[in-house]
Amino acid sequence: MAKKTIVGTIASAAIALGVSIAEPQDGYVYRDAVGVLTYCYGETENAKSMQGRKFSKQECHDLLVKRMAHYDQGNEACVTNWSTLPVETRGAFDSFSYNVGNGAFCGSTAAKYLRSGNIAAACNAMLSWNKGTVKGKKVELPGLTKRRVVERNICLRGVA
């Protein structure tokens, strides 16, 4: 029972850290840098049905906490040693997965490095995920570059 409580506490801390990384990056209802309809702090699920709706900061925060837990669980499903990773690493990758999706994360070089125990390489691999497709071409997005640097730096705090 004590191990489950510790693991649950670590998951909660990682989720909270992921929220703190992702939350200040976005606004309430907007089109993102590549034109995707988005609401709250980067949500795209059912975004069309949210057009014209106003969200309070608390509603957006609560949704982000819920969704971050979803991404933490998805990360755990594809990185077998997830529960042993430092809180900082998990939080950074929760934020990363919230942005790119669990499928993209699970198939990434970063996830491969995490599974092999090379946390520093995994953290650094996030930096290449700073592009979006604009008018059919992949372009670097300055806001995404800043986000990846923040995620990487927090991720590396967990490396001894």
Image (cartoon, rainbow, N blue to C red):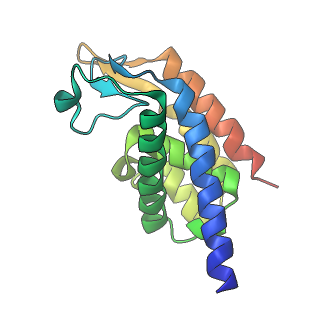
On screen, residue 131 versus residue 6, left or right, reads left
Asked whether the viewer can see residue 126, the reply is: yes
The residue lying at 61 percent from left, 79 percent from top is: 4
Q: Specify the quadrant that holds the N terminus.
A: bottom right
The residue lying at 36 percent from left, 27 percent from top is: 55
140 and 10: which is toward the camera: 10
Q: Where is residue 154 in the image (x, y as percent from the top left)?
A: 70, 41
Q: Specify the quadrant that holds the C terminus.
A: bottom right
74 and 112: which is toward the camera: 74
The residue most toward the top is 135
On screen, residue 157 versus residue 139, left or right, reads right
Q: Position of residue 111 (x, y in %)?
A: 50, 55
The residue lying at 60 percent from left, 48 percent from top is: 16
The residue most toward the right is 160
Q: Where is residue 120 in the image (x, y as percent from the top left)?
A: 69, 49
The residue lying at 47 percent from left, 55 percent from top is: 69
Say which quarter of the image contains residue 147: top right
On screen, residue 144 versus residue 83, left or right, reads left
Asked whether the viewer can see residue 90, the reply is: no
Say which quarter of the image contains residue 21: top right
